[in-house]
Amino acid sequence: MHDINSNGEYLERLVAEIFRALGYEDVRNNPRGMTALGRHYEIDVSFIRDGEVGVAEVKHYRYLSPPTPSLFLKALRQADSVRELVGARVAILAFSCPLTPSLAEAAKAFPLVEIWDAAELFRRAAGFPGLTRKLEHFFEATTSPYTKPALALETGLSETKEMPQKTGRRLADTLLGIRPGRNMAAAFEDACIAALKYLFETDLHGWHEQSNTDDELHRRDLVCRILPNAEIWKLMLDDLGSRYVIFEFKNYTDPITQKEVVTTERYLYPSALRKLAIMISPKGCAPSADKVIRGAMREGGKLIVSLTVPQIEKLLIAKDDGGDPNTYLFERVDEFLMGLGR
């Protein structure tokens, strides 16, 4: 379920509409249940097709940023696991980008999972003009999206069904187990760095921890070099002009204030290709801090993104199941820039 991503939720509903239009019966969004062994589960979309129970796992990826094969394998595994869990005969993995050759190769590991990529969604909706228009609107296009996508990294194909599945859940539990406050600041920083390395393992490089500034008066928690593998990071490189990203970890008991944001802004130097900072904290920013963040972008072209621990938790769990954290980050930035006033 896409509870942190409104576009993901919309795609789930759109897939369900396509199922209904195709004559599938008893189509439901996000049904929940419990197995005989007491295990809870939630399905993106359930349905009955030709008298057989089916389940669909729906993943929202940026169209021009297909997931890596290893991330795609997690999504395939999740779809197949849900199928087995509820005893369904049919499993569909529907997603909003093209099926690249590397993803098609990865899909061979799960022959019981049907693949509905962006082109297949358009093909299935072709006989229903209303659904086609909704898909076109969703993809921000006037025709079916057949432009050439970026190639996913050709890594991770050696991953198999037997590999650990819940790294994100373990990292999230560690992060959630840290109490806000100065005494746990070091543990919070370590947990955040471990989470970020899992979320953005193919997008960032360097991971220079606790680096001092030249004046030795300030320390940045983490500095990484951006790799142009996903659309959000290409945006940071090409449009924002930032080669590096600074992460700051604020294990505060209260929301971040404008004072902390001003300090972070001082670490950003456009001339040094350093114009992006991401702050992680338990409770996010106070309204006064949000105003400073907007001012930093308007007046200095410096982008500061605030992420909370609950948001990081959801990204970690989503990646376990094949979700792409870059999609959420792109939409956060896009929404921020679209709403930026004078």
Image (cartoon, rainbow, N blue to C red):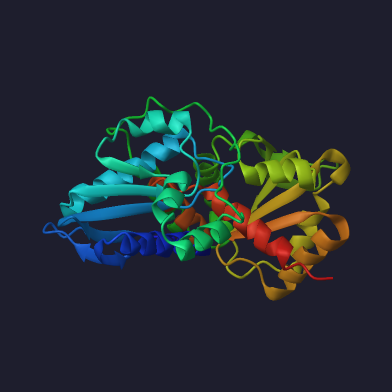
Query: Residue 238 at x, y = what percent?
Result: 76, 41
Q: Nearer the viewer, residue 90 or 82?
A: 90
For residue 71, above or below residue 19: above
In the displayed image of the protein, which residue is found farthest to the left? 36
Can I make out residue 169 in this image?
Answer: yes
What residue is at 57 percent from the left and 61 percent from the top? Answer: 137
Query: Residue 41 at x, y = what percent?
Result: 26, 59
Q: Nearer the viewer, residue 271 or 330?
A: 330
Query: Residue 46 at x, y = what percent?
Result: 27, 60
What residue is at 53 percent from the left and 30 percent from the top? Answer: 153
Query: Residue 146 at x, y = what percent?
Result: 56, 42
Q: Is residue 267 left or right of residue 95?
A: right
Residue 44, by quadrant, is bottom left
For residue 56, above or below residue 198: below
Q: Nearer the viewer, residue 227 or 25?
A: 25
Q: Is residue 313 left or right of residue 193?
A: left
- For the image, the number of numbered tags is 0
What residue is at 75 percent from the left and 38 percent from the top? Answer: 243
What residue is at 72 percent from the left and 39 percent from the top? Answer: 211
Q: Quadrant of the C terminus?
A: bottom right
Q: Quadrant of the N terminus?
A: bottom left
In the displayed image of the protein, which residue is found farthest to the bottom? 287
Can I make out residue 173 in this image?
Answer: no
Residue 138, by quadrant, is bottom right
